[in-house]
């Protein structure tokens, strides 16, 4: 799972922080790239120390690294509270990475929620859209 963005309330980083310990129980790896609120930067460093084999947090921004994260992840998580447009979900779909987004603004407009029963069971959609904005709906 990957996250690329500003570490602030708008981007839903607090939901990722709340869900972090629960997610680390599963067989996943999580990588984050971003900067912003110092408390979230500190949290990323703490997660990296606690979950050395499962979590990597890169404080700052680096274009080549953002491309590698997007290309290398199975899922790109975007739990934004509001997002007038959003680009990372579009980049993810271009790379073949599944965007998991909160159903708001441009995220809702550009990501078609996956329906496994459509097309005679073949399924349709470009990602997963979750609502309401909560830890439980995000991780389910």
Image (cartoon, helix red, strand yellow):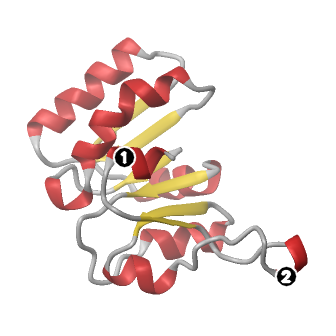
Query: Furthest-left residue in view?
Result: 38
Image position of 36 with respect to 110: above or below: above
x and y, in percent, of residue 124 in the image? 74, 77
Looking at the image, how many numbered discs can be counted on the residues? Answer: 2
Residue drawn where x is 15% and y is 49% of the image: 36
Q: In the visual, does 76 lie left or right of 133?
A: right
Q: Nearer the viewer, mark 1 or mark 2?
A: 2
The quarter holding residue 43 reads top left
Image position of 32 with respect to 24: above or below: below
Residue drawn where x is 22% and y is 44% of the image: 14
x and y, in percent, of residue 81 in the image? 24, 65
Image position of 73 with respect to 19: above or below: below
Residue receiving disc 1: 33
x and y, in percent, of residue 17 in the image? 28, 36
Residue drawn where x is 60% and y is 68% of the image: 127
Residue receiving disc 2: 119
For disc 2, the neighbor class at 10 Å (few under 14, some 14 to 19, many from 20) is: few
Q: In the visual, does 16 lie left or right of 70?
A: left
Secondary structure of the residue carrying numbered label 1: strand
In the drawing, what numbered circle is on residue 125? none
First along the sequence among labels 1 and 2: 1
Residue drawn where x is 34% and y is 45% of the image: 135
CA gap between label 1 and label 2 equals 36 Å
For disc 1, the neighbor class at 10 Å (few under 14, some 14 to 19, many from 20) is: many
Q: In the visual, does 28 lie left or right of 22?
A: right
Question: Could you say which is closer to the camera, residue 68 or residue 139?
Answer: 139
Secondary structure of the residue carrying numbered label 2: helix
Question: Could you say which is closer to the camera, residue 120 or residue 41?
Answer: 120
């Amino acid at each position: 799972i990957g996250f690329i963005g500003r570490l602030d309330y708008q981007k839903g980083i607090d939901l990722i922080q709340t869900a972090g310990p629960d997610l680390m129980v599963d067989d996943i790896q999580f990588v984050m790239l971003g900067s912003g609120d110092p408390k979230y930067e500190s949290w990323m460093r703490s997660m990296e120390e606690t979950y050395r084999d499962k979590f990597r947090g890169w404080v700052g921004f680096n274009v080549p690294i953002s491309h590698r994260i997007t290309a290398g992840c199975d899922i790109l998580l975007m739990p934004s509270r509001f997002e007038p447009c959003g680009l990372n979900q579009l980049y993810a779909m271009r790379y073949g990475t599944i965007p998991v987004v909160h159903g708001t603004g441009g995220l809702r407009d550009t990501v078609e929620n996956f329906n496994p029963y459509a097309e005679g069971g073949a399924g349709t959609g470009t990602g997963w859209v979750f609502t309401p904005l909560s830890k439980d709906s995000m991780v389910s």
